[in-house]
Image (cartoon, rainbow, N blue to C red):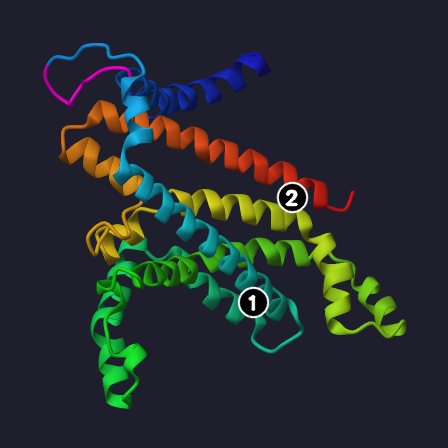
Amino acid sequence: MKRDHAFLLMVIPAFVLFFIFHTYPALQGVFYSFTNFKGYGNWDFTGFTNYFKVFQDSRALSAYGFTFQFAIVATILVNIISVLIAMGLNAKIKFRKTLRATYFLPFILSVLIVSYIFQFIFTHMVPDFGQALGIDALSRNILGDQDLAWIGIVIVAVWQSVAFNTLLYLAGLSTVDEQLYEAADIDGAKAWSKFWRITFPLIAPFFTINMVVAMKNFLMAFDQIIALTGGGPGRATESISLLIYRGGFEAGQFAYQSANAVIYFIVIVVISVVQLRILERKEVK
């Protein structure tokens, strides 16, 4: 058997499976977005009607607003915390390998299970703790507050995502030559100066990857929200993914939410490309 044929035999099954279970359903969703299909029964073509309705839907616009607010705050926080933890774990400290394994544990835990545990903490443990100490700010369940519920979701999302981003920053820090720090010490450079002028420019490609991946993941947040608040109180924490799921599979809006999903896919692609273009320009060449 020729070498090229062997490679094709290895690649084609994976390609076929990917097309059947990923690409074909996606194309089917795009097709139905131009119809009035409810998920069952007959349907007719409606052109771009569903797409125009999305831009006039106050519920969809509210979901977009919450999703972007959550994604931007979570992306910034997770990258700041990850850099700090990675620098600490990259230092010459005792139990470094044990600490690295410990910090990675949240990433291998189920998002739903972690979210339900945090729901119990926010609902019972924190208010009980606050009442025992007489601290009003901690004495209420923030998940039941329309103005504060999103903070609980951010806390859970950041807590679990920090592990993966820290791992990428550790990989970046391992590429920095120690001699650069020794030369900076000789010149009398302070810690902040060494970070800003040496460390950060050299790990900038990893910063770019982390920012793009984190933003994309947070824009698609679903599990944390469904477990913590279910989109409530009211619709205060309803994300786009949650809206598409509920509307498409529970409210007979399959075609309409398919159009919403197509729009959201384009939005995520555009944001990712813009992020890459801007951040790559800042990297040291």
Left/right placement of residue 149 relative to residue 19 reads left
Q: Residue at point 67% right, 58% down?
A: 173
Q: Nearer the viewer, residue 253 or 96?
A: 253
Quadrant housing residue 119: bottom left
**Relative to residue 126, is residue 74 drawn left or right?**
right
Among numbered discs 2 and 1, the one appearing first in the sequence:
1
Stretch in magenta: 34-41
Which residue, given by chain and number where applicable, does mark 1 sit on? 85
Location of residue 11 with respect to 139 vertically, above or below: above
Question: Main SS of the magenta segment?
Answer: loop
Q: Amino acid at mark 2?
A: Leu
Residue furthest out toward the right: 187
The quadrant of the picture occupied by the N terminus is: top right
**Mark pair 2, 1: CA separation:** 22 Å
Question: As drawn, is 180 to the left or to the right of 138?
Answer: right
Is 166 part of what is drawn in magenta?
no
Mark 1: secondary structure: helix
Report the residue at 47% width, 66% height from top: 103
Q: Residue at x 71, y 40 (%)?
A: 281
Q: Nearer the viewer, mark 2 or mark 1?
A: 2
Q: Quadrant of the C terminus?
A: top right
- Residue lying at the far left of the rendered structure: 41
Residue beneath disc 2? 279
Of the residues shown, which amino acid type is indicated by label 1? Ile
Locate residue 53, reporting x and y percent. Answer: 28, 26
Q: Residue at x 28, y 18 (%)?
A: 49
In the picture provided, is 157 more to the left or to the right than 98?
left
Say whether marks 2 and 1 touch (CB < 8 Å): no
Residue 197 placement (x, y as % from top left):
78, 60
Task: State the image coordinates of residue 226 (x, y, percent, origin top left).
Answer: 24, 50
